[in-house]
Amino acid sequence: MADLKEATKENLAVLIEGIKAKLNMANTAVMRAEDFDLAHYEDLLYLYNMVQKKASFGINEMTAIVEELGAMRKQS
């Protein structure tokens, strides 16, 4: 496994894919690694670590996580 402490585009992709997999997101195409900037890497790493530690998520937790991810996406 890669050292996720280093902010690289490859590690960013690992974080996003890991979050999507753990949340069992139905429409994973709406969240792609290229939609996020490395400027948010530390926040994404924190979110990734939090998500990986939990066994399950309530609807309110899921909504909050998705909203947080949405706030970190690049604005086009």
Image (spheres, grey):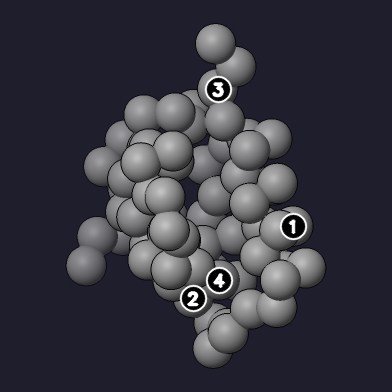
35 to the left or right of 1: right
Decide: marks 2, 4 in contact (CB < 8 A)?
A: yes
- Tell me the distance, in whole angstroms, between the alpha carbons under discs 3 and 1: 18 Å
Residue 65 figure quarter: bottom right
What residue sits 52% from the left and 42% below the top? 41
Q: Secondary structure at mark 1?
A: helix
Q: Residues within 10 Å of mark 3 (few under 14, many from 20)?
A: few
Residue 2 versus residue 44: which sits nearer the camera? 44
Residue 10 figure quarter: top left
Decide: marks 1, 2 in contact (CB < 8 A)?
A: no
Residue type at the position of mark 1: Ala
- Tell me the distance, in whole angstroms, between the alpha carbons under discs 4 and 3: 21 Å
Q: What residue would you read off at disc 1? A: 64
Q: Residues within 10 Å of mark 2 (few under 14, many from 20)?
A: some
Residue type at the position of mark 2: Gln
Q: Is residue 12 visible?
A: no
Residue 11 x, y percent position in the rendering: 32, 48
Specify the quadrant that holds the C terminus: top right
Q: Marks 3 and 1: which is nearer the front? A: 1
Q: Earlier in the sequence, mark 3 or mark 2?
A: 2
Q: Is residue 10 visible?
A: yes
Q: What residue would you read off at disc 4? A: 51
Decide: marks 3, 2 in contact (CB < 8 A)?
A: no
